[in-house]
Amino acid sequence: MPSRTGSHSPTGIGKSIPERGLLLLMVLVLLEGSVLPLGAASSPDISHQKNVDNHKVEDEKYNHTKKAFPVLDLDYHHIQTPFEISLWVLLASVMKLGFHMIPRLPGIVPESCLLITVGLLVGGLIKLAGEKVPPVLDSQLFFLCLLPPIILDAGYFLPIRPFMENLGTILMFAVVGTLWNAFFIGGLLYAVCQIQPANPSELHQLEILPCLLFGSIISAVDPVAVLAVFEEIHINELLHILVFGESLLNDAVTVVLYHLFEEYSAAGTVTVLDGFLGIISFLVVSLGGILVGAIYGILTAFTSRFTSHTRVIEPLFVFVYSYMAYLSAEMFHLSGIMALIACGAVMRPYVEANISHKSHTTIKYFLKMWSSVSETLIFIFLGVATVDGPHHWNWTFVTVTVILCLVSRVIGVVGLTCVINKFRIVKLTTKDQFIVAYGGMRGAIAFSLGFLLKKEQFPMREMFLTAIITVIFFTVFVQGMTIKPLVELLAVKKKQEAKRSINEEIHTQFLDHLLTGIEDICGHYGHHHWKDKLNRFNKKYVKKCLIAGERSKEPQLIAFYHKMEMKQAIDLVESGGGVNLPSAVPSTVSMQNIQPKKPPPAKPEEKALPKMSKGREEEIRKILRSNLQRTRQRLRSYNRHTLVADPYEDGFNEFLIKKQKMFELEKKIKDMHNYLTVPAAPPDSPTMCRARLASGRCTDFRPAQQQRGNKISPDPVAYSMKPAVDSVPTIQVDLASPQSPDSVNLMDEFRRADQQEEDQGLMMKPPSGQSGPNRPGEADRGREQQKLTRCLSDPGPSADEEEEEEPFLP
Amino acid sequence: MRPDAPRGTAAMGASQTRNEHKYHDLADKSGFSLEQIENLYKRFQQLSDNEETISREQLDSIPSLANNPIKKQIVEAFFDKRNQHHNEVGSCGEIGFEQFLMVMSHFRPPSLKTTEEEKETMRKVKLRFLFNMHDTDNDGIITLVEYRKVVEELLSKSGNIEQEAAKAIADAAMLEVASTNVPHMAPDDFYEGITFEHFEQILKGLEMESRMHIRFLDVDTPTLRCGKSTS
């Protein structure tokens, strides 16, 4: 016991009351529990605690051998570590939640600033409570747990096209810029420390190599901080990718410089050979990282080829392989960040073609969730660590560091842009340069690297840490808070929110081919030529190996079209069929309007039918059915561990909510009722379906899309067919008891009914009640309704996804 | 390496002085630098076997073009009189170096000094070039049939894609144009096709002025030249 409290003595508050009972100890531990870090395993504190624990247990054994059987026991130590981890995560999530509740605050202060403030408060509270502040941001925890999700998220969703188009510029900033920053800051810092010989201070002991080490730590732009700020200011794609790409790729430089200077400051001397080895090491670290990442990426893609029977674990492969890539790279001291980026970027196109739509959504949400929790935790820990850290405030050193950081960043960016602009087609303007320079945030990576330094080797470690924290706070608070107003003041181009239209896609491809062709005619092999070569190689060999089935042969344009088709079918259903909702701009353009005067034989009926016609209704039916068939095929392949039950849950909950809204729409839709009673036509060939689908994109689609654009869709989940069914009195829809036991029987009944019609494939539970197939027509309608529900329930959140969303299409 | 290489350079040396004056005119007209014109001229001679004019077959036989799905349109664009800024229509059988250069000038990148208005003009010119590639019958409208043709060509090298798919894509695209530009249409109205204004409208987001460019060589880099197959 005394030794236990002894560990608290650094906090200054004596707690050596020896006769504290077990319960009191537990309370204390509980208090401390909210304090101890995620990475408790790595901290020396924990082993100590375990000892205490053991002692305690032994004590109990000897003292209370005849104790009555404990009815209620308290054993906090048993669950301590996971409990504390959960507490931290909970704190982070609640904080994130809370900020968006406060009105107007998120608009002014970036989230990162608020989180650091929370961290400071929490740290302060812990200190006030007299506890030892845990080493929350220790390097093990940071580099192995908190950083990878953020980087994987960035790598997986990296916009490849702009990234590759600007790769030269990004590399220039990341490699040359970081080198410049490191040496400029390190060198000048050393010079400043040597001034004032008359007034000998502690700074004079500082040698050149520790200074350079410090420079290399502080010079790297931090991806976490950059992401946090840039996601809020919605800057245009070019600037975003420049700053963000730089922050990702400078990792290799930082790793090498860090290890180099750490090594040398131990040795004390540097030779030319060492410098040469440093350059080699840089190449090995960066290219090795990319290679490791690419290998794991290809492995992931290859594995995902065979997951069609166990869809549930698909997302896991993505996460585990990526993490393995990161760890493997770290094992060899290669750049883990580059490995993760390469892994994510390589695997994505192939994995997305292989996995199901739901898995894709899962991956997306998991990545976003993890990365946002990690980010939140990192910023909170940064605040906690600030309170905790053994600080050594030296005015000269800190001020000079902050100023040098700013100056070297500005000089670096301006100087490099001069060179880069000679080669760039789209030149970087002064405004762009300013934003790139100003967006150079420093963050937790620098802090963690500083934390890694050993006190014995670097006596100035505490001063370094203080300076690093100051720089981080300066960039995150001052620059982070002012960058948004500045962007608006300078009228820097913002990101276009518009979605990609099919015309743009066609012309992007057209342009690619055109430029390749012109280059070929010009007779020199430019970017487009090599890109074309690579594309063809990819299509010919790589896709065949890594993508299962027919999709490997699918050209990009068709894939895009399918994606769009799917999205529009979903929109169509959700927006309420043919009903133009009042807020939407009604567009009355339909296929008939663009058809040539002589309609092609493939679809004569549309021409013949009036507006809002059976023809259109037919199209809707077609879309729904073709999607249903696909859905069904997918569901069939699930085994008992999979998501067969899924439609019952999310589908029905959704359905219940929707039903409420349905009644409001009912009046408007009554006319649709007639069309629904028309029995379904026999299914067409897939080709025909597709053709029809195309022509079905009439009035119905436009409003849906425009609504989404306006973001004020009043009733996004509404669809029209359902109330039409409701209005038929013979069908009793009792939605209130979807879980009632007799629904199982009904399911069976329906299954029988299903067998009669090949086209059926429903996992959706039918509404309980007397909805059995009374009359053939009725049954048909009932099933029609289910199809709709199924359709609605299946695509899940995809309807309002961003453009990277790729609806599942088998 | 190539048997005709020394001959080509010798001819160049002679023509260089002879054409010095002519180059200046062309530079003014097309906006290329003298160096770029020289490089393009070398290429032109290479393609035309040192003739004054170049024919469709000669462009067609460029080996690296063989895999380009829209090869036909590209070659056709060179012989399209509309791309020569002369307000003429139709196509010519053979083109000289000047015409070749004028077509190439559509692919010049904007520079830092380009003003906003110049950029706007540049965008229009580039878009007009694309538009002309689609509008094969030169009636100022890309009809559905023409658009379908474009998509079909675009997909033509991607294996056996059904005609239906290409048609469906073109139809969807056309419908998109129609509903963005003419949102209100009676059921029996007829959207004839994409006019240039509509074309501009739908490709607004693509930033043509900066994207539709290739790098023209400023310095002579013979290693990068792709040899035309010389038998």
Image (spheres, helix red, strand yellow):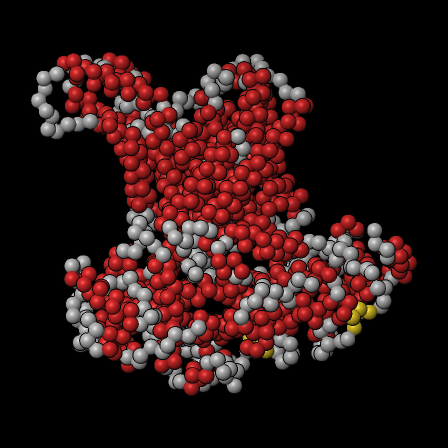
User: In the rendered picture of this protein, how many numbered marks are placed on residues?
Assistant: 0
Is residue A11 placed above or below B25 in the rendered structure?
Answer: above
Comparing A579 with A325, the one in front is A325
Q: What x and y, as percent, mark residue A768?
A: 18, 65
Quadrant the C terminus of chain A occupies: bottom left
Comparing B50 with A787, the one in front is A787
Question: Can you see residue B201?
Answer: no
Q: What x and y, as percent, mark residue A315?
A: 40, 47
For image coordinates 83% across by 60% down, the residue present is B231
Q: What x and y, as percent, mark residue B71?
A: 67, 67
Comparing B154 with A421, the one in front is B154
Q: Is residue A415 left or right of residue B3?
A: left
For image coordinates 50% across by 17% down, the residue present is A457
For image coordinates 25% across by 30% down, the residue present is A79
Q: Quarter-wise, where is residue B196 in the image? A: bottom right
Is residue A55 placed above or below A373 in the rendered structure?
Answer: above
Q: Quarter-wise, where is residue A473 in the image? A: top left
Quadrant the N terminus of chain A occupies: top left
For image coordinates 52% across by 54% down, the residue present is A493
Q: What x and y, as percent, mark residue B55?
A: 78, 70
Q: Is residue A93 left or right of residue B207?
A: left
Question: Can you see residue A419?
Answer: yes
Is residue A682 placed above or below A494 in the rendered structure?
Answer: below
Q: Quarter-wise, where is residue A170 in the image? A: top right
Q: Is residue B35 left or right of residue A642?
A: right
Comparing A728 with A628, the one in front is A628
